[in-house]
Amino acid sequence: PLGLVATDAVSILPALGSWGAEPDEPAGRTPPPAEVRPARLKCSSELRAARCHKLFDGRRSTYWESDMRDGSKPHWIAISGWVVPLTELAIYLRDHDSYSPRRIRIRTQKLPDGGGGSASRGETPPWVSSGTMELGRPAAAGWHTLLDAKELHGVSAIKLEILENHLNGIDSRVSGLRLLAARASPTAAAA
């Protein structure tokens, strides 16, 4: 229904650092979130050296770059195919001059039955705008939250549309995206 091509299987990656019960660790501590890779990832266009999959490769030295040769605007990134509730969607920004996104519209899809799979009955949920974000020129590289747990509740797909770049640039570069999910606590997992 979304017309997305699968690029890799759903996986939950360990967050930076590791989670383990240390002897001096306080009981009931919330474990750090886990990174989630979407099963489906598609971009409006890409350069051969800066492909879409680099958005989730975990390296900040790489990036996805759109290719305006086909004339399509806005540039977009669509992600879907996770099986755990998400707690955050973040974008990694660094200064790419005129390639840096300045305005991004965020659209989401929710399955009509709240995530139980009604799309298998042929229903395609509508894209709903979650708003437009104005991004300042990054003084330093870093992660910036686009959607939090409340905004991601029941979301089955996300589409980021880059409406404008800094300095009226034509093509866009994004250094990374991150999806986070709550990790089960050791006591809850043992129950």
Image (cartoon, helix red, strand yellow):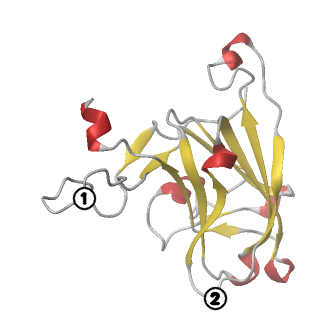
Q: Residue at x 48, y 74 (%)?
A: 61
Q: Residue furthest top?
A: 121
Amino acid type indicated by mark 1: Pro
Amino acid type indicated by mark 2: Ala
Q: Residue at x 25, y 52 (%)?
A: 27
Residue 99: % across, % down:
73, 76
Q: Secondary structure at mark 2?
A: loop
Mark 2 and mark 1 lie on one chain; the one further toward the N terminus is 1
The image quadrant where one finds the C terminus is top left
Instruction: Mark 2 vs mark 1: give the one in front.
Output: 1
Q: Residue at x 24, y 33 (%)?
A: 190
Quarter location, residue 155: top right
Q: Which residue is mark 2?
A: 139
Residue 140: % across, % down:
58, 86
Residue 10: give its label: none
Q: Which residue is mark 1?
A: 26
Q: Nearer the viewer, residue 155 or 157?
A: 155
* In the rendered image, the vertical position of residue 170 relative to residue 141, given as above or below: above
The image quadrant where one finds the N terminus is top right
Quarter location, residue 177: bottom right
Q: Residue furthest front?
A: 27
Q: Are marks 2 and 1 in contact (CB under 8 Å)?
A: no
Residue 66: % across, % down:
71, 62
